[in-house]
Amino acid sequence: MVDQMPTPPPILRFATWEPVLRLLLAGNADRRAARPARVAGRIGRHGWSLALQRRQPPPGRALQTEDMQDELDAVNRVQSALAEAGVDDVSFTAQVSPDGKTALRLFAPSPAVLPGIGTPHPGALLLVEGALPEPWRRLPDPVPEAAPAPTADPELLERTLRERLPGATGATEEELAAAEARLGITLPAELKALYRVTRARWEDWGDDDEAGMRECMAVGCELFGLDDLYVADAPSRGCRWEFAATKAVVTPPGAAVQGLVGSPGWIAFGDNGGGDRLAVDLTPGPGGHVGQVIMLGHEESVGAELVADSLTDLVLNRLNQDRPTRRGERPDPVARVNIASLRSIEAAAHPGLEVLAIGVWDGDPLSLAPVTGLPRLRTLTAYPGTLADPLEIAGLEGLEYLELGPQEWRVLLDAGAVPRTLSAAAIEVHGDQDPLPVVALANEILALWDRPRIIQTVLEGDLGPVG
């Protein structure tokens, strides 16, 4: 008997990818000119990034599904294969010769590499397992003199809500105790008073379709059920390393709210209807009150806004009127040097600098000498070609995140000068660069920390000669 090779799964069959490749080649100038052509992209189970030239709809009509049906069918074919393989996403590049011979390279996801954003190139490289950016490690500062606001009145709060919500089903003391045990925190008196009136479970409303709206109007927000309360700590406010590393925690003198990512004392209890979360704040800033109500904006990853000095004030619609905060004289811990912001590294340098981001630049390459030795500098991002000497990075002894162009990384790797203090890194790629050398570079960096590499699989096929 002749042993037969096992049939590869659909994701590793050239035929699965062929419709996508043909669509990408249809708009490729090299292919039309009968030259070797390269195409690349990324397809995930919930989205894709492909440089396709879509057919334009007739004048006066918006793009509709049928206008891109070929693209949807081709992508769905790959997405079904991804789902069958239990893979979230795959990036790829293909080299196609004029006679149609094709080498398709698939880059399997690595647990140490985030997917690129709208690109086949790798995203952030996670060099230390479980490491978090500094703002996500920051805990609230103690404010021992903080106390509840004079307006906090649990009895008035409960009485007001019972008048507004007659017949509502409130939480029992046992249910409140269970919530405290689940959260690992003692609920403040005002929050307990609120849930004694209504535990905000939709099943308690029965056929009353208006109950939810009445509850929202009575409380002043879309109230979470007692079982849905959660602690809005830093891990609950996720953010990719590339973005999180460029943030900083700042709490000005006299601020009512600490400028944190999250806090073990922020108890999220509602939503404003637009995705912004309301929380009771048990760890206020130096100018705040224990139990004040804050809002965590869904478009922000750091900080929160004071809404009311107490939950009683929220229910009685006595909201914060933009109480002024004394900013102090401290310079910004995040500095951006580019053609539209700061115009020199010297202007960015100060002892409290945490993040230096060098963007698009129209002058001579910049020296990092002015920021060498700064005690708190932890993040450096530099647009490709903006550094006079990448080896000056060796003088930045506290870096935990570094984002550079491929050439700058090449200099550091060849010199053995990649900072070993890093917890994460990224390769800044602009334009239509071949993912293959970028992946190879990423694997070199990952190897320094013995992290899982990006695995490459080559599939060969034939797309036929140029027609």
Image: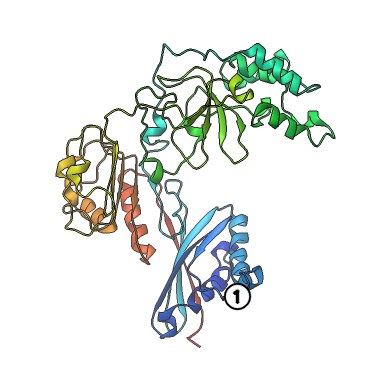
Task: In the rendered view, tell whether residue 128 sits above or below residue 310.
Answer: below
Instruction: Kindly indicate the quadrant of the structure image that contains residue 138.
Output: top left
Check the image and tell me how it is coloured.
Answer: rainbow
Instruction: Kindly indicate the quadrant of the structure image that contains residue 121.
Output: bottom left
Q: Is residue 33 left or right of residue 211?
A: left
Task: In the rendered view, tell whether residue 166 sits above or below residue 342.
Answer: above
* Residue at screen point 60% across, 41% down: 274
Task: In the rendered view, tell whether residue 25 sits above or below residue 198.
Answer: below
Please tell me whether mark 1 sits on a helix, a strand or a loop.
Answer: loop
Q: Position of residue 89 (x, y in %)?
A: 52, 55
Which of 156/273 is in front?
Answer: 156
Q: Is residue 72 left or right of residue 367?
A: right
Instruction: Kindly indicate the quadrant of the structure image that contains residue 214.
Output: top right
* Residue at screen point 19% across, 58% down: 363
Q: Position of residue 164 (x, y in %)?
A: 74, 23
Which of 321/467 is in front?
Answer: 321
* Residue at screen point 53% across, 76% down: 22
Q: Is residue 225 left or right of residue 121?
A: right
Q: Does residue 230 show up?
A: yes
How many numbered callouts?
1
Q: Which residue lies most toward the right here?
A: 207
Q: Does residue 170 show up?
A: no
Q: Which residue lies most toward the bottom here?
A: 467
Which of 83/117 is in front?
Answer: 117
Crowd band around label 1 with a 10 angstrom C-alpha radius: few (<14), some (14–19), many (20+): few
Q: Which residue is mark 1?
A: 57
Q: Position of residue 30 (x, y in %)?
A: 40, 80
Point out the image quarter for the N terminus. Answer: bottom right
Amino acid type, mark 1:
Pro
Q: Position of residue 18 (x, y in %)?
A: 55, 73
Which of 360/377 is in front?
Answer: 360
Q: Is residue 380 left or right of residue 464?
A: left
